[in-house]
Amino acid sequence: MLTPTLIKLPQLKDPRGSLSFLESQNHIPFDIRRVYYIYDVPAGESRGSHAHKNLCQLFIAMSGSFFVKLDDGLGNLYDFHLSNPSEGLYIPSGYWRELNRFSSGSACLVLASLPYDEGDYIRDYDVFKRYKSNG
Ligand code: T46
């Protein structure tokens, strides 16, 4: 998958509640090498404002909701509102992202294709645009 995609995950509902699951290379197109989560975001704060050279990720709104803006640096913009724990937003490498408008008590689970590496980040938007336009 080369573009950001909302992936519907299996959801098993019964009188005890709901259960969702995912498997690497089955429901998502990468092996999971790292998991982190974002929570306790104060009202009005945003996260992200950077891109990754190689990292692919899946964002899941485990509780509450937030918005995700994506930009491929070539003129294509994407807006998502995540609020459902039974779906995940797949983000390939090479997309500038901003997460904002977190609802109170929200939590974003992130499944990542690589270990943490600051060298994989592009944190300057102009550098990102040049990186993308150079192919
Ligand atoms: C992304 C958005 C959605 C680590 O030491 N290990 C980690 O795995 C991560 C993700 C971060 N950190 C350190 C690096 C910084 O000192 O935690 C601190 C905060 O990270 P950052 O400012 O990058 O946080 P966000 O929320 O702006 O970005 C994070 C991810 O870094 C990024 O990949 O897509 O969440």
Image (tube, rainbow, N blue to C red):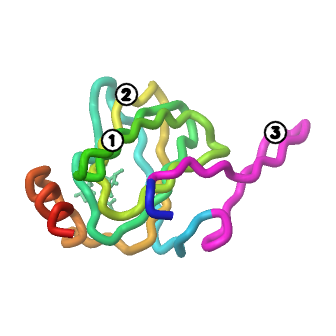
The C terminus - image quarter: bottom left
Q: Position of residue 21 (x, y in %)?
A: 70, 57
Q: As shown in the figure, which amino acid type bears the numbered disc 2?
A: Arg
Q: Position of residue 24 (x, y in %)?
A: 61, 71
Residue at 24%, 70% (x, y): give it. Answer: 120
Residue at the spot of label 2: 101
Numbered range of the magenta stretch: 4-27
Between 114 and 81, the one lying in front of the other is 81
Between 6 and 43, the one lying in front of the other is 6
Residue at 27%, 68% (x, y): give it. Answer: 53
Residue at 16%, 57% (x, y): give it. Answer: 128
Between 134 and 13, the one lying in front of the other is 134
Q: Is residue 102 magenta?
A: no
Q: Is residue 36 above or below residue 113?
A: above
Residue 17 circle label: 3
Sequence-wise, which precedes: disc 1 or disc 2? 1
Count the labels in the image: 3
Quadrant of the picture in which ligand 1 is shown: bottom left
Q: Residues within 10 Å of mark 1 (few under 14, many from 20)?
A: few
Residue at 48%, 40% (x, y): give it. Answer: 107
Q: Secondary structure at mark 3?
A: strand
Q: Is residue 53 above or below residue 101?
A: below
Residue at the spot of label 1: 77
Q: Are marks 2 and 3 in contact (CB under 8 Å)?
A: no
In the image, which is nearer the foreground, mark 1 or mark 2? 1
Q: Position of residue 116 (x, y in %)?
A: 32, 70
Between 92 and 48, the one lying in front of the other is 92
Sequence-wise, which precedes: disc 1 or disc 3? 3
Q: As shown in the figure, which amino acid type bears the numbered disc 1?
A: Leu
Left or right of residue 121, residue 66 in this image? right
Sequence-wise, which precedes: disc 2 or disc 3? 3
Residue 43, by quadrant, is: top left
